[in-house]
Image: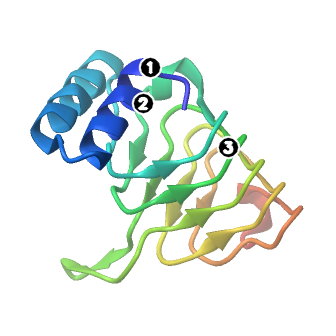
Amino acid sequence: MNSKLWKLSHKLYAHGYRRVGRTLELIYNVLNANSISTEAEIGCNTVFFYHGLGCVVHRDCIIGDNCKIFGNVTIGCKWSNGVNDGKPPHIGDNVLIGAGTVILGDIYVGENSIIGANTTVITDVPEKLYCDWKSGKN
């Protein structure tokens, strides 16, 4: 992750200083107009371009190493009829996620995949696959 403030809040939260970690998370979210949870597991060298402007990442989400994530991306759980349908996605290593992408549900995005801008992903994405909104499916 490219923010020292987020890294610090994540470290504090993980080591039992939950209140301080959450407070720093809130400051980070307000400064950068996003909601990237301190509890999320985000790998080394993963970059949220433009400080994650408009991004939302679920607290139980796992994002691998060396991922590149552009603005206005949502990574979270599926909801139907006001009920949470399970876990958030697991993103593999070296994944590029284009601006405006929505990734929902208990799915896996394979390593070295590319997800084009404004794509909605609700099924597993195999490794080394290019996925975009035109295809209608992965």
Position of residue 42 in the picture relative to residue 134 (left or right): left
Give the label, 3 or 2, closer to the camera: 2
**Tag 3: amino acid:** Ala
Q: Which residue is mark 3?
A: 117
Q: Which residue is mark 2?
A: 7
Residue 107 at x, y = what percent?
57, 76
Q: Earlier in the sequence, mark 3 or mark 2?
A: 2
- For residue 79, above or below residue 12: below
As measured in the structure, the alpha-carbon distance from the residue carrying label 1 to the one carrying label 2 is 5 Å
Crowdedness near tag 3: few (<14), some (14–19) or many (≥20) residues, C-alpha within 10 Å: many
* Local secondary structure at mark 1: helix
**Alpha carbon separation for disc pair 1 and 3:** 27 Å
Question: Nearer the observer, disc 1 or disc 3?
Answer: 1
Instruction: Pick the quarter of the image with the N terminus.
Output: top right
- x 42%, y 30%: residue: 7
Tell me the kind of residue under disc 1: Lys
Name the mark on residue 4: 1
Residue 24 coordinates in the image, percent (x, y): 22, 26
Question: In the rendered structure, which amino acid carries the disc numbered 2?
Answer: Lys
Q: Position of residue 59 (x, y in %)?
A: 33, 56
Above or below, 13 against 60 in this view is above
Instruction: Tell me if mark 2 has few (under 14), some (14-19) or many (20+) residues whose alpha carbon lies within 10 angstroms of its own.
Output: some
Q: Split into 4 quadrants, where in the image is the C terminus?
A: bottom right
Numbered label tally: 3
Q: Does dot 2 land on a helix, a strand or a loop?
A: helix
Q: Which residue sits at x=10%, y=39%? A: 19
Residue 109 rendering spot, x and y as whole percentages: 68, 66
Is the residue 126 above or below the residue 26 in the image? below
Q: Residue at x 72, y 69 (%)?
A: 136
Residue ranking furthest to the front? 15
**Label located before the other in sequence (1 or 3):** 1
